[in-house]
Amino acid sequence: MEFSEPPRKSPVESVVPMINVVFLLLIFFLMAARIAPPDALDVDLPEAAGLTEVEAELPLYLGRDGTLAFRDAQGREAALKALSEARETLCATAAACPDETGPRVALHADREVAARTVAALLPELARLGFQRVEVITRQGGGQ
């Protein structure tokens, strides 16, 4: 009686190494990406020459029609209330507000908004306790 060897099955390729590589790439891109929330309003910033990069803690948006927006709050009263609450939250720790000036506000004002609208907003921000307001512009061609 002759016994033949059973046919050998070819080894199955494991997909585990490929899955590991995909997860490592995913983790790398998540760590390397800068994930920023979308702007509260679509504003066309004015141009200025000789800019320096500024990172303000609290971005406030002022549309060309005078609409204020801060994070998810839209409208003058709602945006200022949300901004004030954000200031209180930031200043709850001494590290966020090391001195009496408090956090900075980055004002993203549309280039078409009237100057008197911006000027009228500044005393309101001062009443809320903001002493530093930075008007954000985009890089323009300096003369």
Image: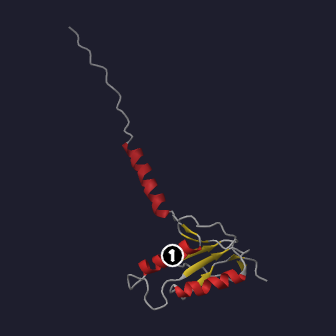
Residue drawn where x is 58% and y is 79% of the image: 106
Q: Is residue 130 visible?
A: no
Q: Is residue 113 visible?
A: yes
Q: Is residue 22 left or right of residue 9?
A: right
Report which residue position mark 1 lands on: 81
Looking at the picture, does residue 96 appear above or below residue 63? Answer: below
Q: Residue 117: image x %, image y %? A: 68, 80
Front in this rendered view, residue 128 or 53: 128
Looking at the picture, does residue 91 appear above or below residue 25? Answer: below
Label 1 residue SS: helix
Report the residue that reaches farthest toward the bottom: 100
Looking at the picture, does residue 74 appear above or below residue 55? Answer: above
Report the residue that reaches farthest toward the left: 1
| Residue 46 picture quarter | bottom right
Quadrant position of the N terminus in the picture: top left
Q: Is residue 11 left or right of residue 136?
A: left
Q: Is residue 51 left or right of residue 102?
A: right
Quadrant position of the C terminus in the picture: bottom right
Residue drawn where x is 33% and y is 26% of the image: 9
Front in this rendered view, residue 111 or 119: 119
Q: Residue 112: image x %, image y %? A: 74, 74
Q: Residues within 10 Å of mark 1 (few under 14, many from 20)?
A: some
